[in-house]
Image (cartoon, rainbow, N blue to C red):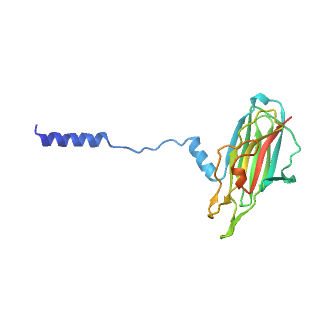
């Protein structure tokens, strides 16, 4: 065989061997989670087996400019029973100014409430925005009376006029995280174990 024929044959085999194929795949829960997150649904799950059958009270604390304010809209005077899992979740509403939250225990039912969001305004933009982000807390030792679980914080405008809410992937329970020095409004959702 001549060299040209062998070279051509090798090129054909190489192109067939390197052909790539795109295939459809079955959607997984993780695929759906991406869509739910994009629509404002957030879920945080906590293993509470060590506290099964104990009572807990959901607590929501609100902060403006780093100072806790009293907000009776989010005060719950009911205790629930912890099971093996506790879920804290957020759900969008039909407007920009509120978001729903829920505490769900697999043994003790659930409770829902609504958080009133505050607008963020920049001098160079006439229209206020309502943008928030939720971030889990680093879980403290259980000798704390109040255990913070999830932060829900507002975005802010930086000096260049960019809207931001970047920083830690988890929040320190003593509220010393850098992001809390910048966000003008936030909620801390947690529990008190009885």
Instruction: List x then y, in percent, for residue 37.
Output: 63, 49
145 vs 123, left or right, is right
| Residue at screen point 66% across, 52% down | 40
Q: Position of residue 134 (x, y in %)?
A: 69, 49
Looking at the picture, tell me which residue is in the foreground, 151 or 58.
Answer: 151
Residue 64 in the image, given as x and y percentages of width and height: 79, 56
The residue at the far right in this view is: 77
> Residue most toward the left?
2
Instruction: Tell me: 43 left or right of 65.
Output: left
Residue at the image position 73 percent from the left and 40 percent from the top: 87
Query: Residue 140: x percent and y percent?
Result: 75, 36
**In the image, is 90 to the left or to the right of 9?**
right
Residue 83 figure quarter:
top right
- Front-most of residues 143 and 100: 143
Above or below: residue 122 compared with residue 189? below
Quadrant of the rendering where the C terminus is positioned: top right
**Between 172 and 55, the one nearer to me in the picture:** 172
Q: Which residue is found at the position 77% from the left and 47% from the top? A: 188
The quadrant in which the N terminus is found is top left
Q: Looking at the image, which residue sits at the far top?
A: 50
Instruction: Decide: is 124 above or below 88.
Output: below
């Amino acid at each position: 065989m001549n060299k040209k024929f062998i070279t051509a044959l090798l090129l054909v085999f190489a192109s067939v061997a390197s052909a790539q194929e795109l295939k459809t795949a079955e959607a997984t829960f993780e695929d759906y989670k991406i869509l739910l997150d994009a629509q404002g649904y957030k879920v945080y799950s906590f293993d509470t087996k060590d506290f099964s059958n104990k009572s807990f009270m959901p607590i929501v604390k609100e902060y403006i400019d780093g100072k806790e304010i009293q907000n009776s809209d989010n005060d719950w005077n009911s205790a629930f029973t912890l099971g093996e899992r506790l879920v804290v979740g957020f759900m969008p509403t039909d407007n920009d100014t509120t978001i729903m939250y829920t505490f769900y225990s697999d043994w003790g039912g659930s409770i829902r409430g609504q958080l009133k969001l505050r607008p963020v305004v920049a001098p160079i933009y006439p229209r206020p925005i309502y943008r928030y982000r939720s971030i889990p807390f680093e879980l403290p030792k259980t000798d704390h009376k109040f255990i913070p679980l999830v932060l829900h914080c507002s975005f802010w405008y930086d000096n260049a006029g960019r809207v931001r809410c970047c920083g830690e992937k988890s929040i320190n329970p003593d509220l010393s995280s850098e992001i809390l020095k910048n966000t003008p409004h936030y909620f801390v959702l947690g529990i008190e174990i009885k």
